[in-house]
Image: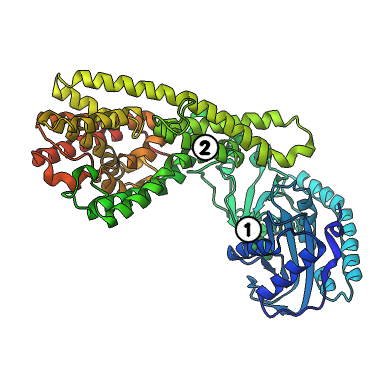
Amino acid sequence: MKITDLLKKEGVALNQKAADQNAAIDVMVNLHDKVGNLNDKDAFKKDIEAREAKGSTAVGMGIAVPHAKSAAVKQAGLVAMTVPEGVDYKSPDGQPSNLLFMIAAPEGAADTHLEVLSKLMTMLMDQNFSKSLVEAKTADEFLGLIDAQEADRDKKEDAKAETAAAAAAGSAATKILAVTACPTGIAHTYMAAEALEQTAKDKGLSIKVETDGSGGAKNVLTAAEIKDADVIVIAADKNVEMGRFNGKKVIKASTADAIHRSEDLISRAVSGDVPVYQHSGSTAAADVATGNESVGRIIYKHLMEGVSHMLPFVIGGGILIALAFLLDDYSIDPSNFGSNTPIAAWFKSIGGVAFNFMLPILAGFIARSIADRPGLAVGFVGGALAASGATFATPDGGVPSAFLGALLAGFAAGYIVLGMKKVCEKLPDALEGIKPVLIYPLCGILIIGIVMCAINPIVGALNTWISNVLNGMSSGSTIVLGILLGAMMATDMGGPLNKAAYVFGTAALANQNETGFMIMAAVMIGGMVPPIAIALATIFFKKKFTANERKSGPVNFIMGLSFITEGAIPYAAADPLHVIPALMVGSGVAGALSMAFKCTLMAPHGGIFVFPVVGNVAMYLVSLVVGSAVGCLLLGVLKKNVEE
């Protein structure tokens, strides 16, 4: 396919005048509509404007390339206009744009056309060629210039490959790799790649550039190439897979830097004055490409990808719920504390909505880390099913498997999609475009639905059994019961153990006797300890936590005091084998002390905001402090130091 297969004579408007950016967009959208590329002109214009809102698509040197992938596009196409006097298109170099191309890419269609468009974008880096297009007198001349330049470029590609191979053969030459990526992956990605390749060629250097475009990564860097490289240049305006570059010299820049300052970037790479990149935090499937990491480390990275994205929902939603208790009036209806007044109900509702995203986000981004973008939808659904407790018999919801179920759903979804990718490798190339939009989401969601509907009934049966055991213990030792209830509240934080303990506590309130009130007090204090213990540990045992975990740690004081146990979930999810046992012991101690001191509570929720109605409140505070301190100390003992 040639560029002029996408750019028709009717789609070229020469010697135009445009008052501003909006006027230029109107002209080009109308050209697309005239050529027949659109099925909804207004919708396509909105998508173009949405892309411009993220940052101007002007690249400098008098060139602008507005573009959008849109459901309003009927067929891939390209239109062009020249504005000899120039138009202010908010270019990064501050200069007006006089050569504009608008790309219309259909949503969900095969991306073969993007390779053609990327060729045009790299051709425009030749300023003499761009100038000749602006000076063209007719549409035929304009298209002829493009055809001639394209043919000449194709001939030079072979020469470029030979030059790169010769440069790579020189042992003293700096071996450079690069990755370019922009949010839309249509224009800037390829222009940045062309600029880096051209500059390296001029200097007689070897370079390989991976382009993370709309059609997926092309020219992908291999583990062997990364190992042998002297330096990697990341010219990107969005996140790229960085884990594979751990321990290598890495230069980070924007696509604009690569387009306009490629010589500076290449010179810096050659100088060797580049910091060594140490990867931490989120990761993705490409992190395993090096093959040098243990299974445990890989699992941990996938966990952290989910946890890092979940944390804002936990913090934002948790604090809003805490505000609801602060602003409410307990005396109106103790059983409805947190929603008695309109303002409290509003805060609790908004916070609850944020909280409801927590488990789908956790599972979704674990799955994305394993299987890249196709895993995201499957993981989201798995996390939502873990939260709802859906089963084959009760698809609308039963007993939630909570965050442990969401963890399982995330990993299951990721590896389900990876398996489907392997199977689909044997499908014809003609079906490539429908894999991510049909095959992966449809089959993946169906399979994860079956998996979670099979798991949740097991959780329900466990919940029933636990409730029966607790009922049998209620007439025995209150201290042993306090230990058990406290530990259960810290085990899975919203899962079957936590929920069984909480339901048992609220049911005990209905008895309206001292034993029932003591049980509820032990349950609440057991749920308050985990976030507080986490917050203390991030202060006293800093080496046990990452920088992001330490920054978020103090927020857990608010959540713990508000009886929002979920504040501890990100930390438990990241290191369950060390964190959960420590929290269980701390909460068990607090529950036992609460029972021993015969502390009572007549409210089902509220944390510190209902302390005025707690019986023996002074010793209840002592129980909370001691349990939190024990949990904190055990975290310091059990957790390993993190590698920053």
Q: Position of residue 83 (x, y in %)?
A: 76, 77
- Residue displayed at 68% across by 61% down: 44
SS under mark 2: helix
Neighbour class for label 2 at 10 Å: few (<14), some, many (≥20)? Answer: many
Three-letter code for the amino acid on which mark 1 is drawn: Arg
Q: Position of residue 512 (x, y in %)?
A: 13, 33
Q: Position of residue 124 (x, y in %)?
A: 78, 64
- Please give the count of numbered marks on the rendered protein: 2
- Residue displayed at 70% across by 56% down: 186
- Residue displayed at 78% across by 51% down: 115
Q: Position of residue 253 (x, y in %)?
A: 60, 58
Tell me which label, 1 or 2, sits earlier in the chain: 1
Does residue 322 sit above or below 502 in this rendering?
below
Dot 2 corresponds to which residue? 381
Single out the mark in the foreground, 1 or 2: 2
Drawn side of residue 141 relative to residue 464, left or right: right
SS under mark 1: helix
Dot 1 corresponds to which residue? 268
In whole angstroms, how far apart are the C-alphas of marks 1 and 2?
46 Å
Drawn side of residue 170 relative to residue 607, left or right: right
Q: Is residue 531 visible?
A: yes
Q: Which mark is residue 577?
A: none
Q: Is residue 294 visible?
A: no
Quarter of the image where the C terminus is located: top left
